Amino acid sequence: MTGRPFRMRRVRTLVPSRGRGGAGGRVNRGAQPKVVALGGGHGLSASLAALRRITGDLTAVVTVADDGGSSGRLRDELGVLPPGDLRKALAALCGDDDWGQTWARVIKHRFESGGELHGHAVGNLLIVALWEQLGDHVQALDLVGKLLGAHGRVLPMSAVPLELQALVRGHDPAAPDAVTTVCGQATVALTPGEVQSVHVVPEDPPAVPEAVAAVLDADWVVLGPGSWFSSVIPHLLVPELLQALQETKARRVLSLNLAPQPGETDGFSPQRHLEVLARHAPKLALDVVLADEAAVPDRESLTDAAKRLGATVELAPVASPDGCPTHDPELLAAAYDRIFRMHGRIGPWR
């Protein structure tokens, strides 16, 4: 499936206004950077919740390798792209007014029953229904975004559902030195072993053309935060998308996680995250690496690892003040805004 040409309406930023205002309740403050954010799951949602506060020209490019929960069931039964991470991205782009927050709750709502609907999210069913009605992934997601009044656009990274496979050392605790192939994003994310590398099946999946075009036309591309092997790196395994990331004139910022993920990146230092990414995409250069200052015990090593990718390190307090390892949307927005201003173009955006 391919999408039809789409012109994103100018979304309004930062200054609250009265009323629903197209579900945004914000006013335009002039030309803004075109930003593309890549990832999946809660990490991408955190990034989008921050970015929608500082730009109205925002596109999310979302991984399509999820095979667990409601998404996995719909994927197995209907052969569709897994809708869950796409739904989460759309929810993150909802405004902070009543309209936006009501729709965010609705599409995240999960049925509880003793039957077949148990565990399914309303948004997943809505997205799949529109895919079947329209026969077009991109057009359907654009329509859901319009309904929600989303502050941006959501695109799948590939037009086909992907299977994530990983080479894992010690996946079987009884054989700690054995390297085995682990299949499925849900399994990879929870592996007790050490992930060596990941790849996707099919090996050369087609990228969604609109996603490639968005990356090539961007001013900034944001990769991460998120599950490193199952949400961040998969974007680098889609050849056309990786080529666009390498060729775009946009500046590229990598946003690091606040803490290692149990199982998938257990014990990883911030710099090791960069080393793993470089092994999967050795020709990909970065401009800025963003990290929470409290999550970097060895700043010199992180700086050295970033330099090897062509990047500088920006440290900022972006963690939630409550102590949970989650990004605070306002603090993360302030960090992105500072990076865009300090490292961006000279003069007005476009």
Image: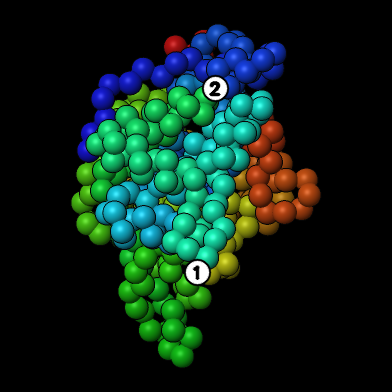
Which quarter of the rendered picture does the N terminus lie within?
A: top left
Q: Which mark is residue 157?
A: none
Does residue 163 appear left or right of residue 232 in this picture?
left
**Foreground residue, 231 or 300?**
231
Identify residue type, mark 2: Thr
- The image quarter in which residue 52 lies: top right
Residue shown at the point (58%, 37%) measured from the top left: 104
Does residue 258 appear left or right of residue 36 in this picture?
right
Residue shown at the point (54%, 54%) measured from the top left: 111
Residue shown at the point (49%, 36%) measured from the top left: 90
Picture coordinates of residue 274, whole percent (x, y)? 48, 53
- The image quarter in which residue 70 lies: bottom left
Kindly identify which residue carries mark 1.
190
Q: How is the image coloured?
A: rainbow
Tell me the element at label 2.
loop
Tell me the element at label 1.
loop
- The image quarter in which residue 16 lies: top right
Picture coordinates of residue 313, whole percent (x, y)? 58, 41
Q: Badge 2 local density, few (<14 within 10 Å), some, or many (20+)?
A: many
**Foreground residue, 145 or 206?**
145
Identify residue type, mark 1: Leu
Residue lying furthest right in this view? 322
333, above or below 162, in the image: above
266, above or below 36, in the image: below
Going from N to C along the chain, the mark reached first, 1 or 2, is: 2
285, above or below 153, in the image: below
